[in-house]
Image (tube, grey):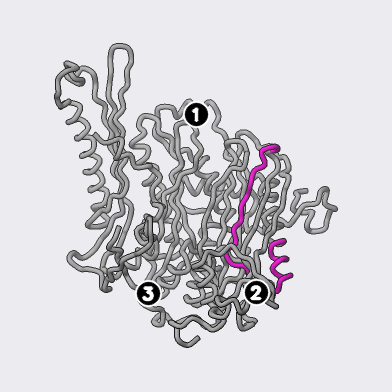
């Protein structure tokens, strides 16, 4: 429709009840909000279906040295492996439906109340295809791209001259050393930095960051957008924390968009509140 | 043999384990000793410096906490993200909780700037204050996380400015000639002893102001604000103090009673020309949405780890 104000013929016919018969292309499913749906279409994509991957994982056992800062590599590996499994199952679904990529991926971890060693990992997002079949939007190696960006952010990212490649992540589960009784007593009246704790946080965060960055290198990304760093404990002892870095690796669409062509934002003030 | 060797095919896997993540990370013991000496000598470990330097020269992918909209807006002004940087200090407060908090944030701030400088940045945007929920030995971790950015064609700043605002707001401020330059902290605490009379009301039936206590509490707050001003002085000509946290506590030991007043104020320091305003026109819109308009909805405050207690804590 060239005229933005008219209702398209297709919609009018559907409203009249003329086109109620089943669609030859099948029915799509998606957890998009209305605005997300509209913006993804505005970006030139159509949703094809919800892609789900899940994985129930039993975490191995690892004992930490009480007085030592150390990475719990069994747990780090488990957390990474389980997420990767959930993601790859989701990706396989997307490939099965011929999607170019998955938008709005939510990656969550759930506890099972009956066993604190078992966690469920779920990845869910909407598979999309380019409406005109443009082949240039696939992810690394011709696989579907994955992105935790919402439909709105997806549209904006393309506007900014970038396309998503893959959700990249880095995980590090770390044991923060306990302080010895002697040391703790020595500090009672003092205002002082506890350097071994600071050190532990630094090391853990740095490792998570390095790992995420490495994933970005592997998919030949220019950068990673929308990165967040989560600190969490999944039913573990109090001194064990997971640092989890996650973001969307992106690459310029073809040549980078010239800065002067990015429009001015409009500032608005809502006068009713 | 470490579990990692199993993936090289040198041993059959004992259990069905999946892929491990690739590491630049070296030997844990060596890393630990590098961190230790780095924190002691107020510098960065060689491997962190190297990674940030490589990101600064474009050899590694950049990492940004920004949203795509912010990425587009910063590109417009030729501002480039480099790396996510952080500063952490786990601080134990022995004799003073209040001073401990001030010292913890100051140390974290210095370390944050150190990482950004290693990346060759001009500024750090989207700086958030964080703590981990792990209460250990009356101590707390003070963590600052943000995105180091460089402005194209500008030499790196040895002391990058620290902006606690998002990249979108950062660009709006810059357009208006205002640079958010840092975080200022004012913290003060005082004890009020029981030898000072007239702390409490004399008679239950009489309306009366508690002047001693009132003056004491006012003094504590004013001192904290004064400190905030002094702290901000070096970095800019204004502070937007977004966080106020105060507690007036009563401690009773036998016959004697004391009061502890403590107050922390934290704000974003700005440096700008006065009387210059936003270059854009502002359109008035009426949002016809029922309920809370998304335009008015408050963004969750990302730089605030203290629940502000002004409503219930104020006198």
Going 72% across and 49% down the picture, which residue do you hit? A56
**Other residues around mark 1 within 10 Å, as few (<14) / some (14–19) / many (≥20):** few
Please state if A244 lies on the left or on the right of B308 as rendered.
Answer: right
Asked which secondary structure carries label 1, the reply is helix
| Helix, strand or loop for disc 2 | loop
Q: Which residue is mark 2?
A: A100
Distance in Å between CA atoms under marks 1 and 3: 51 Å
Tell me where residue B254 sits by quadrant: top left
Which residue is farthest bottom? A2
In the displayed structure, A49 sits above or below B199; it is below
Reply yes or no: does residue A201 show up in magenta: no
Q: Marks 3 and 2: in contact by CB < 8 Å?
A: no
**Whole-percent x and y of residue A49?**
65, 67
The answer, for residue B241, to whether it is visible in the render is yes
Circle 3 residue: B77
Tag 3, which secondary structure?
loop
Q: Chain of mark 1?
A: A
Q: Nearer the viewer, residue B212 or B314?
A: B314
Q: Eyeballing the image, is B156 above or below B267?
A: below
Q: Which residues are magenta?
A: A89-115
Q: CA distance from mark 2 to mark 1?
A: 56 Å
Q: Which of the two discs, 2 and 3, sits closer to the camera?
A: 2
Q: Residue at x 27, y 53 (%)?
A: B240
């Amino acid at each position: 429709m060239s005229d933005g104000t008219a209702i398209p013929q297709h919609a009018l016919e559907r409203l009249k009840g003329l086109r109620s018969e089943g669609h030859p292309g099948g029915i799509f499913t998606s957890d998009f909000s209305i605005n997300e749906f509209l913006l993804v279409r505005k970006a030139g994509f159509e949703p094809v279906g919800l892609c789900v991957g899940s994985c129930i994982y039993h975490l191995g056992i690892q004992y930490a040295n009480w007085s030592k800062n150390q990475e719990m590599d069994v747990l780090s590996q488990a957390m990474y492996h389980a997420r990767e499994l959930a993601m790859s199952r989701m990706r396989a679904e997307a490939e099965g439906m011929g999607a170019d990529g998955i938008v709005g991926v939510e990656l969550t971890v759930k506890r099972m109340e009956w066993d604190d060693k078992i966690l469920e990992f779920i990845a869910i997002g909407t598979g999309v295809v380019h409406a005109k079949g443009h082949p240039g939007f696939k992810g690394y190696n011709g696989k579907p791209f994955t992105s935790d960006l919402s439909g709105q952010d997806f549209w904006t990212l393309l506007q900014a001259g970038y396309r998503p490649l893959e959700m990249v992540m880095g995980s590090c589960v770390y044991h923060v050393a306990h302080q010895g009784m002697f040391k703790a007593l020595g500090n009672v009246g003092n205002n002082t930095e506890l350097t071994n704790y600071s050190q532990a946080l630094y090391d853990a965060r740095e490792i998570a960051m390095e790992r995420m960055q490495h994933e970005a290198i592997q998919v030949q990304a220019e950068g990673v957008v929308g990165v967040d760093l989560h600190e969490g404990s999944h039913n573990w002892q109090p001194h064990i924390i997971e640092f989890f870095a996650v973001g969307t690796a992106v690459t310029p669409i073809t040549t980078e968009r010239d800065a002067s062509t990015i429009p001015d934002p409009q500032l608005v003030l809502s006068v009713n509140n | 043999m470490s579990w990692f060797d199993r993936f090289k095919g040198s041993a059959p896997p004992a259990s069905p384990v999946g892929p491990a993540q690739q590491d630049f990370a070296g030997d844990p013991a060596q890393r630990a000793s590098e961190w230790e000496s780095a924190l002691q000598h107020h510098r960065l470990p060689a491997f962190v410096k190297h990674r940030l330097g490589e990101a600064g020269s474009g050899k590694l992918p950049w990492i940004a906490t920004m949203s795509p909209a912010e990425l587009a807006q910063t590109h417009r002004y030729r501002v480039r993200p480099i790396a996510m940087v952080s500063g952490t200090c786990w601080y134990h407060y022995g004799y003073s909780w209040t001073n401990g908090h001030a010292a913890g944030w100051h140390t974290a701030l210095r370390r944050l700037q150190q990482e950004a400088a290693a990346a060759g940045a001009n500024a750090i945007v989207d700086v958030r204050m964080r703590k981990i929920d792990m209460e250990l030995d009356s101590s707390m971790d003070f963590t600052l996380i943000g995105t180091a950015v460089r402005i194209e064609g500008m030499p790196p700043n040895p002391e990058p400015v620290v902006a606690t605002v998002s990249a979108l707001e950062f660009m709006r401020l810059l357009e208006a000639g205002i640079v958010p330059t840092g975080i200022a902290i004012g913290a003060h605490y005082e004890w009020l002893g029981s030898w000072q009379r007239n702390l409490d009301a004399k008679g239950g039936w009489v309306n009366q102001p508690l002047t001693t206590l009132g003056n004491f509490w006012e003094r504590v707050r004013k001192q904290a604000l004064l400190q905030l001003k002094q702290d901000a002085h070096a970095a800019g000509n204004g502070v937007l103090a977004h966080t106020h946290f105060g507690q007036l506590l009563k401690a009773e030991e036998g016959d004697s009673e004391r009061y502890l007043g403590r107050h922390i104020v934290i704000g974003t320091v700005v440096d700008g020309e006065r009387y210059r305003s936003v270059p854009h026109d502002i359109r008035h819109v009426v949002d016809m949405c029922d309920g809370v308009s998304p335009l008015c909805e408050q963004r969750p405050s990302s730089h605030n780890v203290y629940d502000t207690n002004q409503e219930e804590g104020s006198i």
